[in-house]
Image (tube, grey):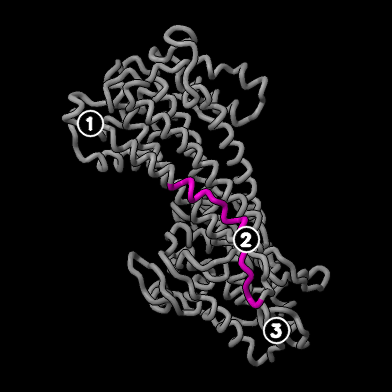
Amino acid sequence: MDKVLLDGQSLTIDQIKKVIYENIPVELSANGIEQVKRSREYVNDIISKEEIIYGITTGFGKFSDVFIDSSKTSQLQLNLIISHACGVGEKFSDDIVKTMMLLRANSLATGYSGITMETLTLLIDMINKNVIPVVPSQGSLGASGDLVPLAHMALVMLGRGRAAFNGAILTGEQALNDAGLKPVELKAKEGLALINGTQAMTSCGVIGVDKSNEIKKLADLIASVTCEALGGIIDAYDHRIALIRPHKGQKDSAENLRTILEGSKLVTRQGEVRVQDAYTLRCVPQVHGGSREALDYVGKIINTEINSVTDNPLIFTETGEVISGGNFHGQPVAIAMDVLAIAVSEFANISERRIERLVNPQLSGLPPFLVEEGGLNSGFMIPQYVAASLVSENKGLCSPASVDSIPSSANQEDHVSMGTIAARKALKVIDNTINVFAIELLCAIQALDFKEPEMMSPVTKEVYKLVRGEVAKLTKDRELHIDINKCAEIIKSGNILKNIEGLVKLN
């Protein structure tokens, strides 16, 4: 892939990743250019006739009934951007902002927004040259779209605000200048075209969906290592169980577990040591499977939103109409991101309970807290505390944002989605879950050191070698935050899944 063509209809998460992480350049497709030009010509015609059309010749929100003279349209657009750029809090990561820019450009490429080629070209040039606006993460209600964060994005296009460029934070004007670009002066409708949309929450959704696609595989893989460490009963993952409760997520998870554990001499069969395991081992396919089903739904919503037009008003040149609607309302994404948070948090919940089984000698049959000379050494006692803290925090973060609404704009905008809050919370849940996974993996590997690691399955043995290559066995107390962070970095790097690619293909 040498470039990504934007037409507003065919952008994929894989393409987005290429642009964000590999700096593959972006271009507007020939069809996109034609659509944008046709739409802009129609807007210009409206202005010349002084028709009263919301957002083109009127004010915004509650001011929708205030006519704006054509001589003041540029000032109106400027005022829109600078008045809406009032976000607060920590800034979004550069990955999220670049995704936001790409999604906005893709939506504008459909030709339903009336933007000029000059303005859209600047946005695409900023993407390609990595001029990344500084965008505060707090302040969006998720309807009328992500007005506040997108306004901060648009500020830089006007030579205002701040942007990251070549490793430095500069004024928008300086960043554009250093990149060989020039700011634009917005024309009628262009301010709305830039900030009316769901791209802040959806960009978080893209990152969240991408990460959760790895998390669901890691959940099965790490659970398998723990299953070996505890001599788990593999019969619970029999394919016939899923056949008579045919949820795809359960079936895929059970298949992963069987595949990963094939060849292991550490797992047991029903009745060999005990008749059945506790739920945290026995019900892995059911719990992980439920989250997988939920993540499939989230992926469907986000992939649809990537190629959606979320502007207002919408310009239908084929029929000569401008229609005000509500595509900017983030409710579909808001609910999906709340679901994503819940689905991922369940991976962490069951992982923390497996950690407890690993460190508790009454449940594991292993040395207390997985360390010799217990008492003198606390071993993995406190990492379990940390995991418990993280899953408890997740429970608070999983309280849905999408059920909340506070009226705004003098009750003109009287129901909002809170979708960006839901999206931000979901990303935090993902981060917490990765740290819980890191703790479980460290505990499971440590437990296996009290057994015979050479009896592990070929797949889990690769995981063991990777972790032990970075983190030594715990023989006496040390600062375990270093070990946890190293293991979390191994997980985030994707190296665990890469290392087993040649051995197994996971669902």
Q: Magenta part mainly helix, strand or loop? A: loop
> Which three-letter amino acid code belongs to the residue tagged 1?
Ala
- Report the residue at 37% width, 21% height from top: 363
Using the rendered image of the protein, determine whether residue 348 is visible from the camera's viewpoint.
Answer: yes
Segment colored magenta: 393-410
Mark toward the start of the polypeptide (1 vs 3):
3
Disc ID at residue 58: 3
Q: CA distance from mark 1 to mark 3?
A: 67 Å
Marks 1 & 3, CB-CB < 8 Å contact: no
Residue 445 located left or right of residue 346: left
- Report the residue at 41% width, 29% height from top: 354
In the image, 412 versus 23, the foreground residue is 412
- Report the residue at 58% width, 75% height from top: 118
> Which three-letter amino acid code belongs to the residue tagged 3?
Thr
Q: CA distance from mark 1 to mark 2?
A: 47 Å
Disc ID at residue 472: 1
The verdict on residue 397 being magenta is yes
Disc ID at residue 417: 2
Mark toward the start of the polypeptide (1 vs 2):
2
Marks 3 & 2, CB-CB < 8 Å contact: no
> Which three-letter amino acid code belongs to the residue tagged 2?
Ser
Give coordinates of residue 318: x percent, y percent. Answer: 81, 68
- Give the class, few, some or many, for how many residues have Cα within 10 Å of label 3's Cα (few <14, many ≥20): many
